[in-house]
Image (cartoon, helix red, strand yellow):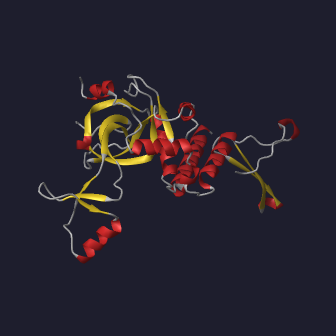
Amino acid sequence: MIRTRSVAANDVRVPEPEPGEAVRIEKYGGKASKAVVLHPSDFALFERLLEIFEDGVPYELELTETALEAHALAESGRDEAEIDYESLARALGE
Amino acid sequence: MSAGRGLRGAIVWAIAPYAPTAPFRIWGGPDQPVAVVETATDLARMALERGLDPEQTFLTAGKLRPVVILQERPRRALPEYAALRIVRLEGLPRAGQEAIRAGREPSLFYLKAGRAKYGMTKEGAIDLNSLLRIHESAIAGRPIGRLDADEMRAVGESLAQHLDIDLTLLVERKIRERMARLAAARRTLD
């Protein structure tokens, strides 16, 4: 994740970007960027995307014991003591 | 089963086979003993050395159970559907069940019991690690319940992660399209 520093709105003067807009604050006559201001909703999306794509670690490494146990039970049919007959009857219209 | 339209997000009873695992049992016909091949490599060697029929009938276990269908087939051009198995919670330790109910298990999408929405009298969870292919002829009867669009979106996002699918370029393109739409809308307002 990106490191985020917070400052009070009363302590700074910043432009107010609209959703979907980035305000680039330039220096040296526009030859370089000093900062970019995003709308909070866009920054939230940016952080979420970073979280999804930054590591590329195989998801299996994140599986919990409960996930593994549930999968093993279902893959062997041991997750249910008895078939849900009421539900099955509904499927068959009976 | 009148499959084909409106099945994306549907919960149906279907024949859900388990993944074939070694040793592999091969049915050779009513008058033949079931052959047992210890490994896939052994079968490959048999094919290489002695020749095999073009295909074999593997005996593999499966179960009639609720699954959630992930795809729509409006043209009915493809008879197979991607689906995920629904696992019942009752066989899990209590702490695990509570974690699933509370949404703290990313691999298990909780489905509460009740006829109205999901059509099951027992609570369950969609196992994001159980991607299946279900032929339309393996679906029994009609759907018993359905996930709504938001739930399918959440399942889809989580499934992409569980399958290690790299969506970077797709998401980047979608973001650019969204930004362009927002900018166009703003220009219109201005």
Q: How many marks?
A: 0
Residue at 58 percent across and 37 percent down: it is: B104
Q: Quadrant of the N terminus of chain B?
A: top left
Residue at 41 percent across and 27 percent down: it is: B122
A60 to B46, vertically: above or below: above
Q: Quadrant of residue B12?
A: top left
Q: Quadrant of the C terminus of chain B?
A: top right
Left or right of residue B69: residue B54: left
Left or right of residue B34: residue B38: right
Nearer to me, A90 or A84: A84
Residue B189 lies, in percent from the top left, at: 60, 37
Residue farthest along the bottom direction in this orientation: B49
Residue B127 lies, in percent from the top left, at: 45, 42
Residue B133 lies, in percent from the top left, at: 33, 49
Q: Quadrant of residue B56?
A: bottom left
Residue farthest along the left direction in this orientation: B31
Residue B46 lies, in percent from the top left, at: 26, 72
Nearer to me, B31 or B95: B31
Q: Is residue A69 visible?
A: yes
Left or right of residue A68: residue B65: left
Residue farthest along the right direction in this orientation: A11
A55 to B16, vertically: above or below: below
Residue at 38 percent across and 23 percent down: it is: B115
Nearer to me, A84 or B133: A84
Residue at 60 percent across and 45 percent down: it is: B183
Q: Is residue B150 visible?
A: no
Nearer to me, A9 or A94: A94
A47 to B93, vertically: above or below: below
